[in-house]
Image (cartoon, rainbow, N blue to C red):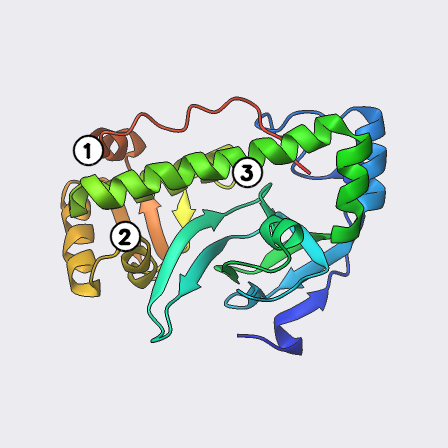
Amino acid sequence: MSGQSAYSLATRQYPCGKCPLRPLPVFREFESQELLFVSGFKKGELAVDKGATVLVEGSHSAHLYTILSGWAFRYKLLRDGRRQILNYSMPGDLIGLQGSLMGEMQHSVEALSPMLLCVFERDQLHELYRNYPGLAYDITWMASREERMLDENLLSIGRRSALERTAYLVAFISSRARGAGLNGKRPVQIPITQQHIADTLGLSLVHTNKTIRKLMDRKLIIWRDGGCEVISHEGLTELAGWQGLGEERRPLI
């Protein structure tokens, strides 16, 4: 999905000093000079419809984005249209950095739900690295964290059984969603389809459906039309043999 209808300028502005994500305990606090710089670094907000392609593989973008609200996923396509989902993005995540540093995007990003994005101009990254070492370290930390998550995903696809890898994926997304404050006091609602799971784990849609039913039979998840609801996060991690993210406070640009 693309075109004018998929994107619109947000009518409501969130100044960086009043960012709704910043009070969450998972994010580290800015120093005053860092906050002042990021306030100028941010050029506005962009509302994106569900299903819209935010960034396209091979494209050159003048912007990078922090997700203020909503869900997205990163993916690559083969020539015949087969899709590999690489990871999922949630509030607080920075997207488009790869295109900013390497010249063009090596993957695409699609909105899983309606999204609100903070928009930053790529050209100001040089000033960030030159004058704000704390923020530069934050971006390095984010890139390292992404590598760590991809390592775990590769381990899952390579060595876990279909049931274990599905349990891991749902637990992984659930952990990240809870850290980003997406659930509040309610169970985590993950807006994915069975096709998304199949494209992430390299399984057929039929195999994915059978595997999800096994997780439902164990009363670990509930599958609804709108996606997946986690019933027992601990049960999923135990089945997957996964220790969890174990993260401390993380950066927010």
Q: Which residue position is annotated with label 2?
A: 201
Name the residue type under label 1: Leu
Q: Which residue position is annotated with label 3?
A: 143
Q: Residues within 10 Å of mark 2 (few under 14, many from 20)?
A: many
Left or right of 166? Residue 214 is: left
Q: Which residue position is annotated with label 1?
A: 239
Q: Distance between the residues labelled 3 and 2?
A: 22 Å
Residue at 60 percent of width and 41 percent of height: 92
Residue 223 shows in the view: yes
Residue at 64 percent of width and 76 percent of height: 5
Q: Which of 81 and 165 is in front in this view?
A: 81
Mark toward the start of the polypeptide (1 vs 2): 2
Name the residue type under label 3: Ala
Q: Nearer the viewer, mark 3 or mark 2?
A: 3
Q: How crowded is mark 1: few (under 14 residues within 10 Å), some or many (20 or more)?
A: some
Q: Residue furthest front?
A: 102
Q: Distance between the residues labelled 1 and 2?
A: 16 Å
Q: Quadrant of the C terminus?
A: top right
